[in-house]
Amino acid sequence: MRNLKNEYKELLKQPLSQLEKSSDSTTVLFLKIYNSILNDQKLLVSEANKAIKNLGGLHVIGTERHESRRIDNQLRGRSGRQGDPGSSRFFLCLEDKLLRIFGGDKILNIMQNIGFEDDTPIQANLLNKSLESAQKKVESFNFDTRKQLFEYDQAINIQRNNVYVERRRIFEKESVRGWLIDYAERSCCDLVNRFKVDENSEAIKLITLKLQNLLGSSFPTDFIIEKTELQYLTFLQQQIEITYDLKEVELASIESGLLRELEKSFILQEIDNAWTVHLQKIAFLRDSIRWIAYGQKDPLTEYKKEAFKYFNIMLARIRHRVVYFVLRSKIILL
């Protein structure tokens, strides 16, 4: 018995199947006491179960009705599990939220005019039907709300997947030099599309100066104005590749592979920062887009259009900033 007092805490931690295999006298005594207590408890539970069934089983009392009938049915279901007897009853006040929204005040005024006391119970099929109708309306409204939220989320989910796929591809690539060249060329195309050339010398000079500022290098601006837009764009793309090759040689003289590290670091950093700002703009857009319904426009359609425009602006900003930071980066040796 002394050994059992000292060891029972450790015996409680061990699986019962493992204890049953042991032939130790202390363990055998522990199992004998355990089985005796277990049988007594089973007998008490069985007698209590019979007594409860004889009294009619579990009775559930509800003090309010939920907006969803499914929740009410789940509550009722507690009273009759697996064929056991049971019953349920709901008691509602006319000031209950669900009744107050859908006509409870009218019923309360009628009772007061007739002269009913406040504690007089009301039982009527009409009231039950009105309550069920109110629940159906609320369920329909909630369903439409969830559906609308899902449609709003779908627009941003497509953008999120594109951003995550792009980040994953960057992580998996050993070199993203092609990405940077593509970013620079597309930034050049953005400038040309924004300021149409059309043999306009002022537009050509403006585009050239902006591209020089973006790349951090100068190249001749007094070339023939009569060049076509395609020839002009080809010239700018050549300057981008020359500038990038020079930057790679410059950084390679300091440390081999340094530009490869800068490329990934700048791209990932700009994607993360731009995506964070983009999500803030989308959240503000979602909160304010409902006002556009007053202009006889569909808020969801306009939301998708604006979200797509914001996304394109974000991508352009990422391209410009990455090219700017990579090509204008300077290494300071201490």
Image (spheres, grey):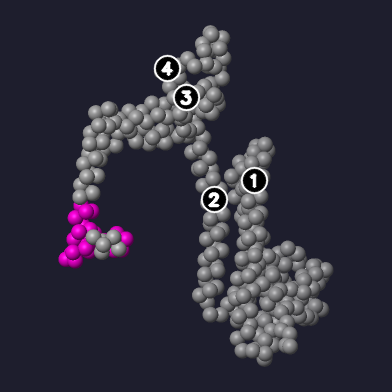
The segment highlighted magenta reads 7-35
Q: Which residue is mark 2?
A: 153
Q: Which residue is mark 3?
A: 92
Image quarter of the C terminus: bottom right
Q: Is residue 209 visible?
A: yes
N-term-proximal mark, 1 vs 4: 4
Left or right of 153, for residue 316: right
Tag 3 and tag 1, C-beta contact below 8 Å: no
Asked if residue 149 is positioned above or below residue 91 in the image, the reply reads below
Tag 1 and tag 4, C-beta contact below 8 Å: no
Q: Nearer the viewer, mark 2 or mark 3?
A: 3
N-term-proximal mark, 2 vs 1: 2
Q: CA distance from mark 2 to mark 4?
A: 45 Å
Disc 2 residue type (three-letter): Asp
What crowding class fits label 1: few (fewer than 14 Cα within 10 Å), some (14-19), or many (20 or more)? few
Question: Could you tell me which secondary element the residue under label 3 belongs to?
Answer: loop
Q: Is residue 249 visible?
A: no
Asked if residue 25 is positioned above or below residue 296 in the image, the reply reads below
Q: CA distance from mark 1 to mark 4?
A: 44 Å
N-term-proximal mark, 2 vs 4: 4
Q: Is residue 31 magenta?
A: yes
Q: Which residue is mark 1?
A: 287
Q: Which residue is mark 4?
A: 123
| Rendered residue at 51%/47% (across/down) | 150
Q: Decide which of 159, 224 is in the foreground and name it.
A: 159
Q: Quadrant of residue 294?
A: top right
Q: CA distance from mark 2 to mark 1?
A: 13 Å
